[in-house]
Image (cartoon, grey):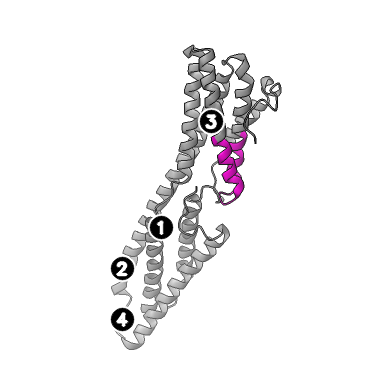
Amino acid sequence: MEVTGLLDPFPLWTILPITVGLALLSVELGYRFARNRQLRQQDEKESPVGGMVGATLGLLAFMLAFTFGLAGSRFEDRRQIVLSEANAIGTAYMRAQLLPVPLRADVSKQLRDYLDARVKSDAVSPVDEEWRGLLAQAARIHGALWENARHAAELDPNPVTSGLFIQSLNQLIDSFGRREAALNRRVPDVVLWLMFATFVLSGLIVGYAAGAGGRRPSWVTFGMVALMAVLVYVILDLDRPRRGLIRVSETNLLDLQASIKEDPGAAGASPAASGVGR
């Protein structure tokens, strides 16, 4: 089951307007607070808060860089794991051709069904019932493959044939678990909350500094705030592995799927050979 994170209940297209609106609101509130304070205290100047503005913006830059690094590293981990899973499935499929003839077509068919399910699961939202069905199908195929591997070891205990296939099957199942775990490995909510708090505080202080100086925030200020809002949006997008615009490419799995379909042995497999339904 996918782990939900901060702002997951909101559709992706609403995150950027929410972030920009929150930033602009914080700047405006800071400005109005400073102007109201000046009406009561005339000696308030920009200089006492100038250093605080620089320090707060520096802290915000640090938080954005830190959070972006966390989200980016998790994205790269997911990309590498997809490559590892494609390699594991491809290796298992090739070694399946070393199995005894009575099992070869059955195992090859199961591996093709498994690959199709893994490719399809990436295009399905985790909130859909179909996604849970694809995970259940993958688990059933794991069991069927292990049963065939056990049978192959009984028919031919030679480690060069059945032993190598069992090893590749282990790697296939391990890669499945690593990929699902990587999809659930998100930036901790406490880090995201701290980033948002620093973001809002920076807007308040920037607006306050402008108000204390007796002028409205400049367009440069709003441009900076908008840029930071875009960075926050990118961070949250990277942290949504299944629902964001920035997604891990499935090219490796798709290339493997195409190459297996072109395999002459694939066409000869009976549709009813596998005991695992789609």
Disc 1 residue crowd, few under 14, some 14–19, many 20+, Cα 10 Å: many
Give the residue at x 46% y 63%.
Answer: 224
**Number of marks in the image?**
4
Label 2 near label 4: C-beta < 8 Å? no
Distance between mark 2 and mark 1 Cα atoms: 22 Å
Which range of residues does the magenta coloring cover? Answer: 116-139
Q: Earlier in the sequence, mark 3 or mark 1?
A: 3
Distance between mark 4 and mark 3 Cα atoms: 73 Å
Q: Magenta region, mostly helix, strand or loop? A: helix
Residue behind mark 1: 192
Say whether residue 119 is magenta.
yes
- Amino acid under disc 1: Leu
Residue behind mark 2: 52
Q: Position of residue 32 (x, y in %)?
A: 41, 80
Q: Position of residue 212 (x, y in %)?
A: 36, 78
Give the residue at x 41% y 62%.
Answer: 196
Figure quadrant of residue 61: bottom left
- Amino acid under disc 2: Met
Q: Earlier in the sequence, mark 4 or mark 3?
A: 4
| Closer to the camera in the image, 198 or 158 | 158
Q: Which mark is residue 73?
A: none
Kind of element beneath mark 4: loop
Residue behind mark 3: 143
Instruction: Reply above or below: 268 against 246.
Output: above
Distance between mark 3 and mark 1 Cα atoms: 39 Å
Instruction: Reply above or below: 264 against 116.
Output: above
Kind of element beneath mark 2: helix
User: Which quadrant would the C terminus be assigned to in this image?
Assistant: top right
Residue behind mark 4: 44
Label 3 near label 4: C-beta < 8 Å? no
- Amino acid under disc 4: Glu
Figure quadrant of residue 258: top right
